[in-house]
Amino acid sequence: MKTDKLFPFLQWLPSYGKDQLKGDLSAGLTVGIMLIPQGMAYAMLAGLEPIHGLYAVTIPLMLYALFGSSRQLAVGPVAMVSLLTAAGISGMGADGPGEYLLYALTLAFLVGLIQFSMGIFRLGFVVNFLSHPVINGFTSAAAIIIGLSQIKHLLGISLPNSEHLDIMVLAILENISGIHWATVALGIMGIVIIKYGKRIHPAFPAPLAAVAVGILMVWGLGLDTLGVKTVGNVPSGLPSFSAPSFDLSGWGTLFPIALTISLVGFAESYAIAKTVHARHKNYRLDANQELLALGIANLGAAFFKGYPITGGFSRTAVNNQAGAKTTLASVFSAILVMLTLLFFTGLFYHLPNAILAAVVLVAVSGLIDYKEPLNLWHKDKADFSMLLTTFLITLTLGIETGILAGMALSLLMVIYRASRPHMAQLGRVPGTNVFRNIKRFKNLEVKEDLLMVRIDGPIYFANVEYIREKMEKWIRDRNGKTKMIILNLESVTSIDSTGAHELSEWISNWREFEMDICISGTKGPVRDVLNRWNLISCIGSDHVFMDDQTAVAFFDQKLDQESIQKYAPYALQSNSDKKIDKSRI
Amino acid sequence: MKTDKLFPFLQWLPSYGKDQLKGDLSAGLTVGIMLIPQGMAYAMLAGLEPIHGLYAVTIPLMLYALFGSSRQLAVGPVAMVSLLTAAGISGMGADGPGEYLLYALTLAFLVGLIQFSMGIFRLGFVVNFLSHPVINGFTSAAAIIIGLSQIKHLLGISLPNSEHLDIMVLAILENISGIHWATVALGIMGIVIIKYGKRIHPAFPAPLAAVAVGILMVWGLGLDTLGVKTVGNVPSGLPSFSAPSFDLSGWGTLFPIALTISLVGFAESYAIAKTVHARHKNYRLDANQELLALGIANLGAAFFKGYPITGGFSRTAVNNQAGAKTTLASVFSAILVMLTLLFFTGLFYHLPNAILAAVVLVAVSGLIDYKEPLNLWHKDKADFSMLLTTFLITLTLGIETGILAGMALSLLMVIYRASRPHMAQLGRVPGTNVFRNIKRFKNLEVKEDLLMVRIDGPIYFANVEYIREKMEKWIRDRNGKTKMIILNLESVTSIDSTGAHELSEWISNWREFEMDICISGTKGPVRDVLNRWNLISCIGSDHVFMDDQTAVAFFDQKLDQESIQKYAPYALQSNSDKKIDKSRI
């Protein structure tokens, strides 16, 4: 591996100039200002002290800057991964916040290890197996669950942690009488500032403004003495070194959730990295390098009191809009957060939890997508049902089951598609030598004793059974009148050994039932395979044709009882030569 | 479901005649004679008393006769399933033969339940996902393991039960000094009779002859008093009713092996049923009905002191050759075994175990296939390595791991293929309007500012990433000279919503980098999808062409700075009409 592939920053560093610096600085500071409230809010969502959300964007961001192949991706805590962290750790029965933190560090360590290994073993392609509708349904459901989990902070009531819709809704209804109205007022104010603050000016740091207003109100009006819950003491200083747990039985329990976070986190991160990359293209985005970089960043989080992080949607968009040219922007963000940790943590004492809840709520409300389901309902019913299934499973059975069900669904879809290649019966367009699918075109000429079939796709173990059954059905449908079968293989891209065995079996079976068989329009690689398995000689080289019309002519002449030999010149005589010959293409 | 689909025998019963009866009677009795030694031998292989192999072919065979859709399949104990039964139960630490039998009954019950449910839920297609090379490698390895497991009976030594090659070979070597020569002599005699007895006459019941000679020799020479192990007391009478265990924790432990037996058993059974069916075709073979029938037969085995069974290779072949016309043949086989159980069990007292071992050894020696690996080595290296991997894993890590690894390998292959559709850059065959893959054909005309690509296969979530990366690579390879991309979609069979989203993203990205894009040769269903997602208007309806040459002409004219409008007549103007129009096909 070349050094500048392992350290992508070496690609831009030599030519780094003032223009880039200006963009990176402005973007880095903008994102840093977003990171302070968001980091604290998401850490709270993960069930951690808010400060760990700030720790998570110090060393890890610098590590990503060294290894990341995307130049605009802004990594850090995100809502989904934070919720998954909470869901994973809540099942461990942690004995106090110290042990809870230890589990969070261990989770970050495992996520780092998994992502790093996946990067090394070049498994980035697995993310392809989460289809678009599955991600969409999953994200909408997760946003609803995340939103509901913040209701308690917004209403100022105590609720048990849960990611199950029914339990959450029931608990909210049971505790509705305990609503703390001052907290609700602060929360609504926060939502209004964050949601409508942008209208003042696109660069207005709305979440930070909400934080400032919240702190001032609690401090000025003494709201904390009236029962408004605040962040309280935040220790100052940079994160000290921390170690994850190396208890292997704990690893076993955390592994499923770590795997889920690794995959979901990477899928989210890579999706946004791709979108932003499409606007630049002056560098190469590499899925495996991204896995590696995210893995290393998460290992950094594990050793410096953070928790699992990944590339975030909104901050990356802001980073790009604010002019980030390289990963140096992330370094500036990290520096800003570190200065805050050193000098300004005292300010957060009066920060009300309801404001942080407002930050999360506004962020995730944008993730609930109702347009795409409607769109799919009109345009692709199969994909719509995948979306709806994933959405409902996630909402009712929880986030982890939801993502697993989504992957299983996607995989089943791949298998289902792979096992059912498109097949068409062909007929002649009257007055031409063109043959088309009789289902798509009307008025085609079809002979009742000639079955012409085109197979679209490879012939291999996963689909031979389907092809055989479909052929047999079509033969049955013709009530024994079929005298010849012409297999058009022009769209067959490959044939494996199972396919070759089956093909030769079909040929001998059909011939036993007095149906002759011809092949037309094979591609080069397929012709090679047919030769290698002696299928050409099994069919007879005078039964292999360059196109449908010669095959049909052969059939017509055969019916007329004329000599077959006469037509040998039309047939493909030498199958191994590959030089161009007009009569063959 | 129609009654005669659930009970396939209703299809032949009304027209059943003398001819069929003659064939069924002769086949049924021939197979019954085979079943007596084989059933006892395989039960011994499964670690059970030999009599359970006979019990397993009473009621279960009659049940299969009622529900089976194959008319020639002969079900009963087979070597592979017997070995899997032994492997599964040996891990349970059974407390004496009574508990061992209980586990065998429970296993049969679970297998029955799984196969029955798979049949009901129409999951018969899963068997497609064991590819030919995987089955071949697995069978050869399993045959070696089964053969080795019989060595102890042949040598007259005691060995621990194991399905691990190294343990077995080591144990044989350690105990080699204890060889009992009289037992060896009997065993070799058995092998010779069974293997060469057929040469006398094809209908000669060689295994039964070996059993008879073995019994006579032990009885006449008093070999049992010299230490030759024999079957001993075999209780007479039909099997009484038995119940499997309903202890759920036991079910949990047995489930993996039950699932393996269900799949392997069904795969073996269906493969032979298909082969025989191909010689008849006067009835419909249905994978799901076969699952249902095997499931019910196994439930029968669970409740009448049998153990897991399936359709066997050699007996089915004999059944077919001996003239079986319907499943009534199986009923005759069952009746013969039941008569034996009622009146002749006393004869088996002196039957030496070595003869039963000889029956198994000869049967499995035919399963070791060295021709196909050689064949694949020459013809399909990818399939060869799948065969070899499955063979080695099965041989070293055991049967269960082997079959799971084989399925995983097959599945990975499906996913790998699905994620990498064949793609080709096209060039013009000089002097023609024909465009071909520049990798397969030499001397094609390629313009350096025109990238023509054909995608062979569907465009959907599992492969969009691969397609995008390949396109970007080809664009990069041309060092920014590309001015237009023509996507030939003639081999694209479908596009899902992820594919449609990506396609529209690619189009806008490419246009941003000043590369225009045209589409040529779409099929009907794909054109419908493109219309539904507004991709035709996104590309521009004047950029969609019926074939490559019109698209290239459009590109040439555009370069010549001439008006694009001029070429509108060539473009596909109305995409929704499906009536035939010569200029469009």
Image: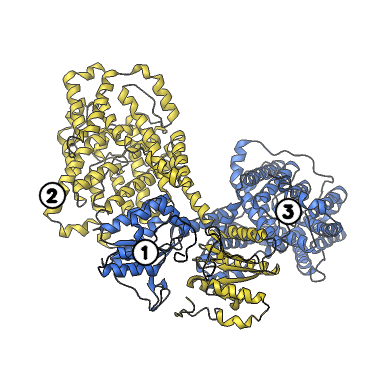
Chain colours: A yellow, B blue
Is A168 positioned to the left or the right of B228 in the image? left
Q: Amino acid at mark 3?
A: Val
| Towards the viewer: B563 or B352 | B563
Residue of label 2 = A22
Q: What x and y, as percent, mark residue B359?
A: 74, 60
Q: Badge 2, how many Cα within 10 Å: few under 14, some, many 20+?
A: some
User: What chain is tagged by disc 2?
Assistant: A
Q: Amino acid at mark 2?
A: Lys
Residue at 34 percent across and 21 percent down: it is: A157
Q: Badge 1, how many Cα within 10 Å: few under 14, some, many 20+?
A: few
Quadrant where the N terminus of chain A sits is bottom left
Q: CA distance from mark 1 to mark 3?
A: 67 Å
User: What chain is tagged by disc 1?
Assistant: B
Q: Name the disc covering residue B75, or none.
A: 3
Secondary structure under the numbered disc 2 in the rendered image: helix
Secondary structure under the numbered disc 1 in the rendered image: helix
When asked about the image quadrant of residue A425, the answer is bottom right
Q: CA distance from mark 2 to mark 3?
A: 79 Å
Q: What x and y, as percent, mark residue A128?
A: 40, 52
Q: Is residue B261 above or below residue A358?
A: below
Mark 2 or 1, closer to the camera: 1
Residue of label 1 = B569
Q: What x and y, as percent, mark residue B543?
A: 35, 61
Contact between marks 2 and 1 (CB within 8 A): the answer is: no
